[in-house]
Amino acid sequence: MREDWYDVAQICLNGHVINASSRRYPQYNKKFCDKCGAATITSCQDCNTEIQGRFYSPHLIDCTRYKIPSFCYNCGKPYPWTKTKLKAAQELALEMENLSPDEKEVLTKSIDDIVKDTPETSLAATRIKKLLSKAGKTAASAFRDLVVDIASETAKKLLKPEL
């Protein structure tokens, strides 16, 4: 076994972590999620690359919680749970009653930019924060529940307390 290595994560299609160390602890693997019933995967559905799980190193004691990835490190495509949350957030944006059609469109377009750390992330987070304040507490809370797990760290910092 290599000195430093990533195990393979097993995650359900809705983004619930089943096992962050599916090779090291296979006895905890499951075919279906016990939280939502969705099938589980251990590799990217686009390029078949294994999902990086917990990192192991004899030089480190890792006390951190496993953070579910949003995108495949090999092909860059979003994982199924990221696609689902993005789609749901975009649909929710279109349902917000206190926003004009133009504002709904701006909000919908900004959602893609908060899941990646790019030069557009700060602008998108600022737009979202402004629009969510107009949308009302209930809509902002529902939006938060959808994107909190997939938003980039930059977006999370800028969107507080909305996220």
Image: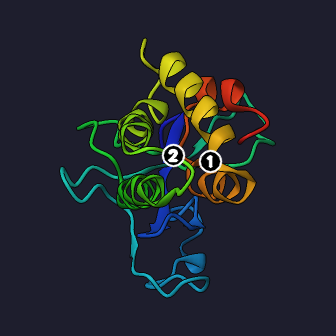
| Dot label at residue 135 | 1
Give the mark nearer the N terminus: 2 vs 1: 2
Tag 2 near tag 1, CB within 8 Å: yes
Query: Which one is in front, 88 or 106?
Result: 106
In this view, 75 is above or below 48: above
In this view, 95 is above or below 93: below
Instruction: Estimate how packed mark 1 is, as few (under 14), some (14 to 19) or many (20 or more) residues with alpha carbons within 10 Å.
Output: many
| Dot label at residue 99 | 2
Instruction: Estimate how packed mark 2 is, as few (under 14), some (14 to 19) or many (20 or more) residues with alpha carbons within 10 Å.
Output: some
Q: Position of residue 163 (x, y in %)?
A: 71, 42
Q: Position of residue 121 (x, y in %)?
A: 48, 21
| Dot label at residue 121 | none
**CA gap, disc 2 to disc 1?**
6 Å
Q: Position of residue 24 (x, y in %)?
A: 56, 61
* Residue at image point 53% right, 45% down: 150
**Number of disc labels:** 2
The amino acid type, in three-letter code, at marker 1 is Ala
